[in-house]
Image (cartoon, rainbow, N blue to C red):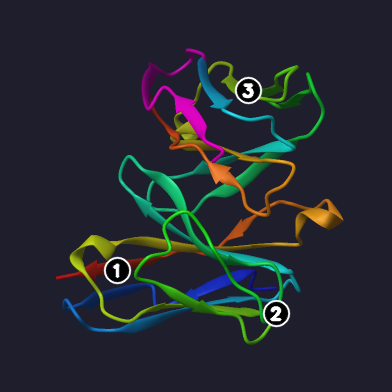
Amino acid sequence: GQQVMQIPQYQHVQEGEDFTTYCNSSTTLSNIQWYKQRPGGHPVFLIQLVKSGEVKKQKRLTFQFGEAKKNSSLHITATQTTDVGTYFCAGRSNSGYALNFGKGTSLLVTP
Amino acid sequence: NAGVTQTPKFRVLKTGQSMTLLCAQDMNHEYMYWYRQDPGMGLRLIHYSVGEGTTAKGEVPDGYNVSRLKKQNFLLGLESAAPSQTSVYFCASTWGHPKGQETQYFGPGTRLLVL
């Protein structure tokens, strides 16, 4: 079945440094979504990418969807302490009803 | 709108006991999902429903049953709880991909401890 792998599992950065998490699928995805979960909270939708090679930006966050629609990345420029949390990618294949979530990347930002 | 709500927020069970987790959404969403989240394992899909009266198995369905008798509610049942079912359970809902609106809205979660 479809698997979504996410790396790294953990990342610890100093405030102001950049951060990137990567997501790879074993199969071609119909779309990919990114979620953020704050400690003790629930996942919250950030963005959805649909088109091959698509790039979207939300302030300091840049999301990319690979040309082959099998990989994606989330890049945060100049991290802030408010960026702390776990970032999940989730992909859906063309034939599936459900999203397959990666295991997430936990980001810790120290001042 | 309340969005997605879950009850209870926290529960302690003894091995062998049963319980039902309730998820309710007021957004008229077609699709609903139950996930469990364990440290280092991410979100794993237990069961899902693509409409009232329908259910389907996800990645880790064993030991759980579900029902979707009303469109706004999705119930998750544990007939005989086991310590391995200690987890945080999240419910989510979405319009459904045929309509192009796939954002999953998550509830606040239910923390379950099985002793």
Element type where label 1 sits in the image? strand
The amino acid type of the residue labelled 2 equals Glu
Q: Confirm whether the magenta stretch covers residue A15.
A: yes
Query: Gap between marks 1 and 2, in whole Å?
Result: 26 Å
**Does the CB distance between marks 3 and 1 fall below 8 Å?**
no
At x 44% / y 53%, what residue is drawn?
A: A41
- Residue at label 1? B112
Residue designated by label 3: A71
Please, what secondary structure does the residue beneath circle 2 have?
Answer: loop
Tag in front: 1 or 2? 2
| Residue that badge 2 annotates | B52
Tag 2 subunit:
B
Q: Residues within 10 Å of mark 1 (few under 14, many from 20)?
A: some
Q: Which segment did they paint magenta?
A: A1-18
Q: Position of residue B67 (x, y in %)?
A: 55, 81
Q: Position of residue A29 (x, y in %)?
A: 69, 34
Q: Are the residues flagged by discs 3 and 1 from a single subunit?
A: no
Quarter of the picture containing the C terminus of chain B is bottom left
Residue furthest top in the image: A17
**Which residue is at 60% across, 72% downward?**
B55
Task: Find residue B72 and report its horizontal and vertical position in percent.
Answer: 67, 80
Work out which residue is located at the far right of the displayed protein and give it. Answer: B99
